[in-house]
């Protein structure tokens, strides 16, 4: 268990920020790295052509460690939707085949599939959530001989309902379907090993649970998918691009590994140093340790919430870092504002009050949440 890390953040005592699934705060170290990065661009003569390649490699390697990949398999992307667009452009889909998605999945992992299915006269199969909450079972049932692509998160973005990606990966491979994962709502706080799950593509934005800047993300591309087509014509992704004087010796070949899928201007002087500091912090805490700590925090909140008549998915049905509280008669209209007035920041997603703490939260935040809920429900 990791003790509260609030001292590393600029969060006033009277704010209970339990909304990491919306936007993760930057730690003081990340802010300092970001400020340094902005200062550096004020002095461009200090930026060499090598800098266009060194920091990207550092960031790639750090992210690779978080998901147990090789840095060769990582592309730098600006948003989850960008990575899913790359996957959709490259995965074959034929008439009559299906793409399996989850009901009310985040749109970044939906629109590209709808477009691909439309173009191919294929079908999107949307798996409904069963009353018993066993999402894995219904997803496994939906994967059959017609399935070409299974595109899922690790946990649902509204209430954290968890999927067993190891079993889903196995079933997908058995039936020859490709697996595309959007782990934006779990990466860095829920252990995941691409060597075991073996997705074809995995994407994550970094501005939530990885506590990084906005407009930063990564995509894992399985080795057998690395000869695919990027969705843009990025000069830096071509061989020999380190030689700035020779850039007009146009090259058809790409940099090795997944680098061909890097977004244009991925050597972002403003965001990369901050992103690197954020990834280093996650690795220093350790993903399994973060997961255990946040799971215990949420179990404590769920127990106290149940005394107010608010229920949630059982701890074994949801990701530990996520809690969706359900109100027996629906979420009161004024609830969010009332919580905000008490300094409590959470979200409403679907029919759940979404509580998503990180290591900067402490016991006083939970007391503040409970007091505010009691007051709002009185
Ligand atoms: C599951 C999930 N994926 C992705 C995103 C962000 O998507 P993008 O990076 O495409 O803006 C969110 C934001 O809430 C999300 O919940």
Image (cartoon, rainbow, N blue to C red):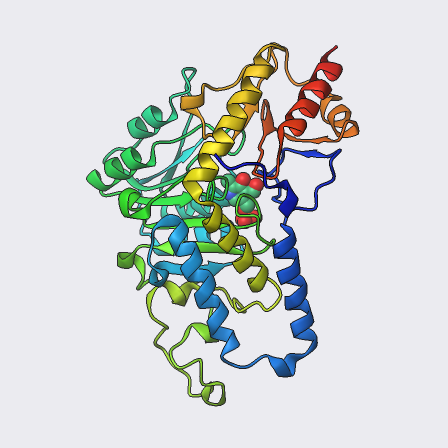
Left or right position of 102 against 346: left
Q: Using the image, determine if residue 88 lies above or below residue 276.
A: above
The picture quadrant for ligand 1 comes to top right
Question: Considering the image in quadrants, where does the C terminus appear?
Answer: top right
Q: Position of residue 238 (x, y in %)?
A: 40, 76
Q: Nearer the viewer, residue 73 or 250?
A: 73
Task: Tell me where residue 168 appears, x and y as whole percent.
Answer: 30, 35
Q: In the displayed structure, does residue 287 sit left or right of residue 21? A: left
- Depth order, front residue of 245/68: 68
Question: Residue 132, how many percent across, how many down?
Answer: 40, 15
Q: Say if 55 sits above or below 101 in the image.
A: below
* Residue at the (52%, 30%) spot, across then down: 322
**Residue at the location (48% across, 20% down)?**
313
Residue 163 position in % (x across, y down): 38, 31
- Residue 90 seen in render: yes
Extreme residue in the left direction: 174
């Amino acid at each position: 268990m990791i003790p509260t890390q609030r001292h590393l953040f600029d969060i006033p005592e009277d704010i209970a920020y339990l909304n990491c699934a919306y936007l993760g705060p930057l730690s003081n170290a990340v802010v300092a790295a970001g400020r340094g990065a902005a200062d550096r661009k004020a002095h461009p003569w200090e930026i060499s052509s090598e800098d266009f390649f060194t920091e990207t490699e550092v960031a790639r390697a750090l992210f690779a460690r978080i998901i147990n990949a090789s840095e060769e398999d990582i592309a730098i992307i600006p948003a989850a939707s960008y990575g899913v667009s790359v996957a959709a452009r490259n995965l074959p889909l034929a008439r009559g085949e299906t793409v399996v998605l989850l009901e009310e999945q985040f749109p970044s992992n939906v629109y590209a599939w709808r477009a691909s299915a439309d173009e191919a006269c294929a079908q999107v199969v949307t798996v409904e959530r069963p009353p018993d909450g066993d999402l894995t079972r219904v997803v496994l049932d939906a994967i059959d001989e017609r399935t070409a692509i299974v595109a899922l998160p690790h946990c649902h973005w509204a209430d954290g309902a968890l999927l067993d990606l190891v079993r889903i990966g196995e079933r997908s491979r058995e039936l020859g379907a490709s697996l595309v994962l959007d782990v934006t709502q779990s990466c860095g706080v829920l252990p995941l090993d691409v060597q075991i799950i073996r997705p074809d593509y995995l994407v994550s934005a970094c501005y939530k649970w990885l506590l990084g800047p906005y407009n930063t993300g990564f995509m894992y591309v399985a080795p057998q998918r690395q000869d695919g087509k990027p969705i843009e014509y990025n000069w830096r992704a071509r061989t020999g691009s380190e030689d700035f004087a020779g850039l007009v010796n146009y090259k058809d070949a790409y940099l090795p590994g997944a680098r061909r899928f890097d977004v244009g201007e991925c050597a972002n002087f403003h965001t990369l140093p901050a992103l690197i500091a954020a990834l280093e912090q996650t690795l220093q805490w350790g993903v399994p340790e973060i997961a255990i700590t946040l799971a215990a925090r949420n179990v404590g909140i769920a127990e106290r919430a149940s005394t107010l008549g608010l229920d949630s998915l059982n701890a074994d049905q949801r990701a530990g870092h996520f809690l969706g509280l359900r109100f027996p008669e629906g979420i009161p209209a004024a609830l969010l504002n009332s919580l905000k007035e008490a300094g409590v920041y959470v979200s409403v997603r679907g029919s759940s009050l979404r509580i998503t703490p990180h290591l900067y939260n402490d016991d006083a935040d939970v007391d503040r949440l409970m007091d505010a809920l009691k007051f709002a429900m009185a």
